[in-house]
Image (tube, rainbow, N blue to C red):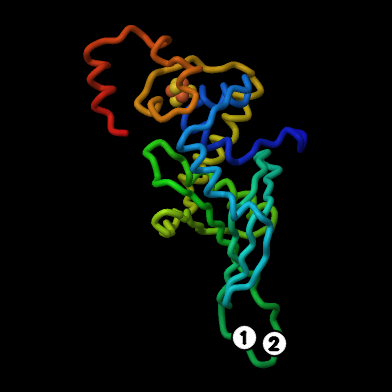
């Protein structure tokens, strides 16, 4: 894959929300913001600025560009904190070992509260995978910072999350290479989708039944 074809990490969240939505946006150029997408943009306003500062034992870097050549992904981390690594053992007085490299800790900023269909953890994990590849290190965890509640939710990059992230990257690349927009399937999440008017999932769905109607209205937001 050529570097200019690398996919933005932010597309993974969109793709996992709905493959058709990702195709409408990325293949057909259809996009419209709504409350949720604008909240996302607003949340990144301050941390998109590149900065590098020391705070106590941490170095904080905002707006850092990251890339994974293995997965063909590129993106920007809102914040990466470099935490001092604890030495494995007490150094002997005669030895003069190099200090251990600081461990990167990516933090992604979200403005609104988490919705049921969001895949923020995948987006964060993709950033961690990029950082690992770039810095030749291993990153066990990061965090999602919810601006409204000022709360940090820690995310552990376990095997399951890594597999979900890598699979999403591969499937998204395949979707774009095939250039075929999947057909619509009406789902509870369609109600919060900014492309609802263009997608028309109700017009394209199979004939409605009472059972299907009940399933739809009983599904929580
Ligand atoms: S309206 Fe529903 S099916 Fe259509 S793009 Fe949005 S989420 Fe996907």
- The numbered mark at residue 95 is 2
Q: Residue at x 67, y 65 (%)?
A: 52
- The numbered mark at residue 20 is none
Tell me the element at label 2: loop
The picture places residue 172, in percent across and down from the top left corner, at 58, 30
The quadrant in which the C terminus is found is top left
Tell me the element at label 1: loop
For residue 4, what is the image quadrant?
top right
The picture places residue 40, in percent across and down from the top left corner, at 51, 43
The picture places residue 78, in percent across and down from the top left corner, at 59, 53
Displayed-image quarter of ligand 1: top left
Measure the alpha-carbon separation of dots 2 and 1.
7 Å
For residue 171, what is the image quadrant?
top right
Q: Is mark 2 within 8 Å of ligand 1?
A: no
Foreground residue, 189 or 139? 189
- The residue under label 1 is 91
């Amino acid at each position: 894959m050529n570097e200019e074809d690398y996919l933005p990490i932010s597309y993974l969240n969109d793709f996992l929300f709905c493959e058709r939505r990702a195709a409408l946006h990325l293949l057909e150029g259809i996009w419209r913001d709504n409350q949720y997408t604008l909240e996302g943009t607003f949340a990144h306003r301050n941390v998109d600025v590149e900065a590098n500062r020391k705070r106590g034992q941490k170095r904080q870097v905002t707006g850092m560009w990251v890339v994974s050549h293995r997965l063909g992904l590129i993106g920007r981390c809102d914040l990466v904190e470099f935490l001092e690594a604890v030495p494995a053992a007490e150094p002997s007085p005669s030895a003069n070992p190099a200090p251990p490299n600081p461990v990167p800790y990516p933090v992604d900023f979200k403005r609104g509260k988490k919705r049921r269909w969001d895949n923020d953890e995948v987006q964060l994990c993709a950033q961690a995978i990029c950082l690992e590849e770039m810095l030749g290190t291993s990153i066990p965890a990061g965090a999602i910072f919810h601006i409204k509640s000022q709360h940090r939710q820690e995310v552990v990059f376990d095997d399951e999350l890594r597999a979900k992230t890598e699979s999403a990257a591969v499937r998204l690349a395949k979707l774009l290479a095939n250039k075929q927009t999947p057909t619509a399937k009406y789902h509870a999440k369609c109600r919060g989708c900014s492309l609802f008017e263009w997608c028309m999932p109700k017009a394209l769905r199979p004939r409605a039944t009472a059972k299907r109607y009940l399933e739809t209205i009983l599904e929580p937001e």
